Every structure is written in structure tokens, then in C-alpha cells.
Image (spheres, grey):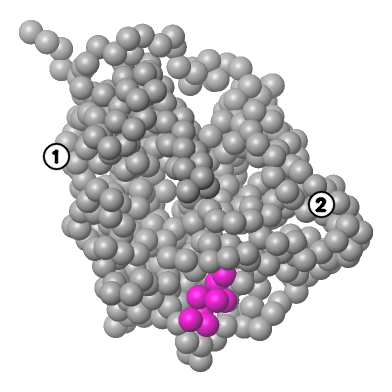
Amino acid sequence: MFPIITNHPLLSRWKRRFKHGVYLPDEKDDTCGLPIRHFDFPPVLVVPLSQSLGKPALATVVEGQEVTRGEVIAVPDGFLSVAIHAPATGRVRRIGHSPTIQGRVKTAIFIEPYPGSTQEIVTDTPCDLLQCSSSQIIDAIQHAGIVGLGGAGYPTHAKLRIPEGKSVDCIVINGAECEPYLTCDHRVMLECPQDVIKGAEYLMAASGAPRTIIAIEANKADAADALRREIVDGSPIQVKILDVKYPQGAEKILIESVLGRRIGHGLLPIDVGALCFNVASAAEVGRLLPIGSGLVDRVITVAGPAVRKKGNYRIPIGTPLRFVLETVGLTEDVSLVFLGGPMMGQSVSSLDIPICKNTTAVIAFGDTHARRVTRPRQMPCIHCGFCVDACPIFLNPSQLGLLAQQHHYDTMVQQFNLLDCFECGCCTYVCPSHIPLVQYFRVAKAAVKKERLNAAESA
């Protein structure tokens, strides 16, 4: 008789709001109860001109120029570009190259903060919710430099420009925060519920949506209560509690859980009448637009076994990762650092990269714990089907992995819908052969993207 396994991540299916996915240890206890604290300014801030999908912003400052915190230092260059603001009052030391988490270099503005400055934020024209049109609100969001703060970095204003022939009947605000270790969204909802509600009102006004649902996993009931206390009677905004499960916070998965609308192959949320925004993005909309300010810092979880002063910090954009780790202190030499969560985040190869708008967390492991999370030696696929059962969008990761090893990228796209994969990592997590499936898929997608760009340029 086979033994009964009660803790396998693919079991307990009767609890699920959506099919497949996995159950993970959340590792949130160390930081979920710690209030947001402001972080010190580093000696030099490194502010990349590209911090979102789309074209980099165009610098409007020169080397040696003095800047004031909140001042626009780069303007949008096209539809998917957003403004960049000075995260501190100081002097532009230089404009040059800076390393990125992808291993490439990008242009950045290096700013030396003035030690004696009060660091008051300069503001611009406020965007009045009752007076401004939808197009004015959208322009204000672009000017404020707000992007998806859940990690994707998609410009918030671009989502709000509804294509002709489409309409939105519901805004879904993502407060699931299903990644292990991350609690920054939890603290934002708990400490700044009025900003989240105000942001939802701006998003509804900009999109024409008649209602909003704020979706929160059940392990953040205190945040749900805080938001409900801010919602007035008769408001079109409501809070919905979801089961704790990964990847609940993925856009398409969340919409299916909340609205029961499945977003099929090649479709977007707008195709089913919905738009999804991260709760931190909504909070920044509600915080910044009424005062006419820009995004100069964001709340980030700093945690992991190697971190002494774990917590959630409001960190200036452009703060070098090395300075963050030196400030919080380390229990041992760091051998593995993630930007973002350990499932969808990326490990870094350099501590000289800066905190950007789409950085949700810094998770550090020392040698002892790094050995536990480093995957053992890869073995051949045994066709167990665990990855197929885990994939929340019903792909065949096993077959995709075999094709990726043979570099059959076109087949992966055309026959097995590779581009639907949002790299949640469920397949890699459950694979008993320790095959790095999601890493294979990232390489394949990058190769496809490069091939398509080359084809477009030569056409």
C-alpha cells in the first residue's frame, strides 16, 4: 500500500479557487508585523532612465546640475515611457552607464544627495479627482512616473488607455502578495488604506469602470479590515478575501479567481472587461496625484535568513543594493540575493545595481541557507506529470523543457503556447528531477524576441 502524503504542494485541491498552482511556505512572519520605516539616503543614487517596459525616458538634466527632490529629471519618450524624478535634493555627478539585473548596462543619472538638505519634495499641479477628465488623470499618472509596482513594471497610464471597441466593467486591485517573504503590499494596505481607496477612485474615473474589487489573500485579514474601515457605505469598492495559494497574484489567475472570467490564449484582461493593478501602484496613485508629486521612493521588503534588521522600508529609487545590505546588516557573508521573491524574482550577480520602481523586495541568503535553496544536480525528465498538474495556465512544461534543450523555439511558440507562460516557477518548484524549466523558458522567450526584432528591422 502506498504511503499517504499530506504535505505535497499539489494536494488539497478542494481548497482551490483556481486549478493547479502550488502551496508554499510563506516565510512572512519576520516582517508582516513590522511598520514601514524610511531608509537613509546613500552617498550616491543611481537612477536608471529605463525602469519600466517601453522606451527609456529622456534626461532633462546635465552633469553638475543641482536638482531638487521630486523634480523631473527625465521626460517620457513615447506612449510606454514614464517620467523620472529626482529621488533626492543634490547634484548630478554624472550621466553614464550602470549595471542591471539582466547583466547588461543602461544609462543612468548619478546624483549626490546634499547631506544638509531637508529633502522636502517639490510638487507640481495637483490632479483633482472631481475636476479632471479621464485623459487628464491618465496624463498625470504618466507624469508622476507610476508603473506596476508588483514587479512587472508596466506603465500604469498605458493600461488605462482603453482601446477602441473595448470597455471595462471592473477594476481588480491585486493585494494577494502570494510570493514567499514579501510583505510590503501587506504593510501598505495596513498603514495607508486611505491611499489605496483614493487610488481606486482615480483608476475608476480614468477607465470608466463602475466598480473595484480589492483582492486579498486570507493571511492578510488585518489589511482587509483596515481597507473596509475606509470604504464608505454605498461605495462601488469592495474587498474580497481569497484562499492562500501561489500564484494567486498573477494577473490572469487573479481575474479568474475574483470574477470567474478565464482569459484564453493570446488574450488580455481588457478582452474580458477587466483591468488589474497592483495595490502599491493604486496607493501611489492615491498618494501622489492629489499633491502633484512624482514617484521618488517605494516600499520594499528586505528580508531573508542573512538579514539582521529585516523589515519593510520606504527606499529612495536609485539606492544601490550594496548600500541597502550594509545598512540593514548581515548575519553572515551573503552568497545569494534575490530582487523580488524567490519564485519570480531574479538572483543578482552584482551588488552595484540600484533599487528601481519595480523592485518589490531584497531577499538575502547566507552560505548555510543558500545551500538549502540551491537546486541539486539536474537529472533527466521522468515524465511524472507533476509540472503539468502544477501549471496554472495548463501548459505542458515537460514538453516545453525538452524542446528548449533542443532549441526548437518556434515549435514551443506555435504548438505549445510558450508566450502564455508568465514564469511563475511552479513547474520548477515541483520537478523531482530538478530541471530548471522556467530558466529554459526565459532563454527561449528572449531568443524568440530577438529573432522577431531582427526580422522587423530587416523588413
Q: Is residue 339 left or right of residue 181?
A: right
Q: CA distance from mark 2 to mark 1?
A: 55 Å
Against 350, is 93 above or below? below
Picture quadrant of residue 11: top left
In the picture as drawn, the residue positioned furthest to the front comes out as: 459
Q: Position of residue 194 (x, y in %)?
A: 49, 72
Q: Position of residue 64 (x, y in %)?
A: 92, 59
Against 378, is 308 above or below? below
**Upstream in the sequence, badge 2 or badge 1?**
1
Q: Position of residue 20 (x, y in %)?
A: 22, 37
Q: Which residue is mark 1?
A: 14
Residue 7 in view in this figure: no
Mark 2: give few (<14), some (14-19) or many (20+) Cα within 10 Å: many
The one nearer the camera, 431 or 437, is 437
Q: Is residue 307 magenta?
A: no
Amino acid carrying mark 1 in the image: Trp
Q: Residue at x 20, y 47 (%)?
A: 17
Q: Secondary structure under badge 2?
A: strand
Q: Residue at x 43, y 78 (%)?
A: 206
Q: Nearer the viewer, mark 2 or mark 1?
A: 2
> Dominant secondary structure of the magenta stretch?
helix
Amino acid carrying mark 2 in the image: Ile
Picture quadrant of residue 19: top left
Against 413, is 379 above or below? above
Q: Which residues, given as a range, are shown in magenta?
A: 135-142
Q: Residue at x 36, y 30 (%)?
A: 409
Q: Which residue is mark 2?
A: 95
Q: Is residue 11 left or right of residue 381?
A: left
The one nearer the camera, 244 or 165, is 165
The one nearer the camera, 191 or 127, is 127
